[in-house]
Image (cartoon, rainbow, N blue to C red):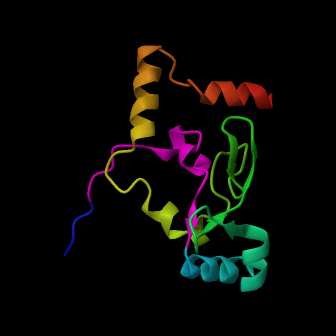
């Protein structure tokens, strides 16, 4: 019987920093999962959803423009700041941040506390939308 480790971050309080990484790796298994989940052929996934990465033989998710981070994963909902393919997301996304803490969440929480603004960053993008 394994015990789940505690988690010291809340993704609902973040503007999806992890989705702004320029290279979000996608394995062949991830491409197959995306194809099945989105009802596309593997060729369509490779042509429309992924592209060659910077390192030889790698594939990464394509990006879209973003009003906070310049570009983000094409599957990030720009308003809700949530993944639109969560059930089919790549392994890199499933594993993030890989520890019980998220460095960006810790930084953001610290700045919100220091500046006495619990909506720091979130307020900025919500204002842009309104």
Q: Nearer the viewer, residue 32 or 58?
A: 58
Is residue 54 covered in magenta?
A: no
Q: Is residue 82 left or right of residue 100?
A: right
Q: Is residue 13 visible?
A: yes
Q: Is residue 40 visible?
A: no
Which quadrant is home to the C terminus? Answer: top right
Q: Say left or right for 112 vs 15.
A: left
Tell me if residue 14 is in the magenta stretch. Answer: yes
Q: Quadrant of residue 58?
A: bottom right
What range of the chain is rendered magenta?
5-26
Q: Residue furthest top?
A: 115
Q: Quadrant of the N terminus?
A: bottom left
Q: Residue at x 53, y 39 (%)?
A: 14
Q: Is residue 64 left or right of residue 24?
A: right
Corner quadrant of residue 120:
top right
**Which residue is most to the left?**
1
> Which is more toward the observer, 93 or 57?
57
Residue 46, percent across and down? 72, 76
In this rendering, would 24 be left or right of 125? left
Decide: is 90 above or below 123: below
**How many labels were placed on the picture?**
0
Residue 86 location (% of width, % of height) = 59, 64
- In the figure, 44 relative to 13: above or below? below
Residue 42 in picture, x, y percent from top left: 71, 84
- Which residue occupies 75% across, 82% down? 39
Question: Relative to 57, is 104 above or below?
Answer: above
Residue at the image point whose x is 63% and y is 51% from the top? 82
Above or below residue 27? Residue 18 is above
């Amino acid at each position: 019987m394994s015990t789940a480790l505690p988690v010291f971050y809340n993704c609902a309080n973040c503007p999806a920093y992890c989705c702004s990484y320029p290279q979000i790796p996608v394995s062949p298994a991830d491409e197959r999962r995306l194809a099945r989940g989105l009802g596309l052929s593997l060729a369509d996934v490779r042509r429309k959803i992924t592209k060659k990465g910077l390192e030889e033989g790698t594939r990464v998710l394509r990006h879209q423009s973003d009003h906070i981070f310049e570009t983000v994963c094409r599957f990030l909902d720009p308003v809700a700041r949530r993944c639109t393919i969560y059930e089919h997301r790549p392994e890199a996304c499933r594993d993030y941040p890989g520890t019980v803490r998220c460095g960006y969440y810790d930084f953001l929480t610290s700045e919100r506390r220091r500046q006495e603004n619990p909506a720091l960053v979130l307020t900025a993008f919500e204002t842009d939308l309104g």
